[in-house]
Image: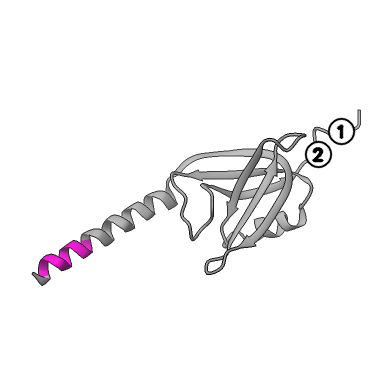
């Protein structure tokens, strides 16, 4: 009986480890999005995650929410600096969200400041 219970526990742990490895290392898509950085914060009670939003339209009707992993120190510093400015985000999308890494499936890997297309001098 103890041997069967041990096998079941090992199988469950192996399935969880396989699922986590797949979700973390396999990316569903990679891409870029641009918009005005309207929110960036470190939130959570037990597990703190970095979360943000960019507005992709003049009226703010199209909001892109994203997360940043703690290991991306440069990205975090840039996003804090670029608050309220127009930015271009490079992201990877994972198959599922992992709650202790972030609230979304979109994880930012790079950010650059850009000129806003709405306020160009012509």
Quadrant, the N terminus: bottom left
**Residue 11's disc number:** none
Residue sticking out furthest to the bottom: 2
For label 2, the residue is 115
The coloring applied to the image is one colour
Q: Is residue 25 left or right of residue 108?
A: left
Q: Earlier in the sequence, mark 2 or mark 1?
A: 2
Q: Mark 1 = which residue? A: 120
* Residue at x-position 18% and y-position 62%: 8
Give the image location of residue 46, x and y in percent.
Answer: 52, 69
**Left or right: residue 52 compared with residue 4:** right
* Image location of residue 81, percent across then percent down: 77, 56
**Marks 2 and 1, Cα distance to the nearest angstrom?**
7 Å
User: Helix, strand, or loop for circle 2?
Assistant: loop
Write the residue at 16% across / 64% down. 7
Tell me which corner region of the image, top left, top right, bottom left or bottom right, holds residue 91.
top right
Q: Looking at the picture, does residue 35 appear above or below residue 39?
A: above
Q: Residue, x 60% and y 48% (percent of image)?
A: 66
Describe residue 37's horizontal placement relative to residue 23 as left or right.
right
Find residue 78 and report its image quarter. bottom right
Q: Which residues are magenta?
A: 3-10
Furthest-left residue in this view: 1
Disc 2, disc 1: CB below 8 Å? yes
| Image location of residue 24, percent across then percent down | 44, 52
- Residue 48 against residue 78 in the figure, above or below: below
SS of the residue under disc 1: loop
Q: Is residue 6 magenta?
A: yes
Return the residue nearer the eye: 65 or 82: 65
- Residue plotted at (77% across, 34% down): 58
Locate residue 55 relative to residue 115 in the image: left or right.
Answer: left
Q: Residues within 10 Å of mark 1 (few under 14, many from 20)?
A: few
């Amino acid at each position: 009986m103890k041997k069967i219970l041990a096998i079941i526990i090992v199988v469950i742990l192996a399935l969880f480890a396989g699922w986590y490895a797949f979700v973390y290392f396999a990316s569903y898509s990679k891409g870029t999005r641009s918009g005005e950085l309207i929110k960036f914060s470190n939130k959570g009670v037990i597990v703190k995650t970095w979360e943000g939003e960019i507005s992709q339209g003049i009226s703010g009707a199209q909001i892109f929410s994203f997360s940043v992993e703690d290991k991306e120190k440069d990205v975090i510093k840039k996003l804090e600096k670029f608050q309220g400015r127009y930015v271009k985000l490079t992201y990877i999308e994972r198959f599922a969200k992992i709650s202790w890494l972030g609230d979304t499936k979109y994880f930012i890997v790079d950010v650059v400041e850009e000129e806003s297309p709405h306020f160009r001098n012509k």
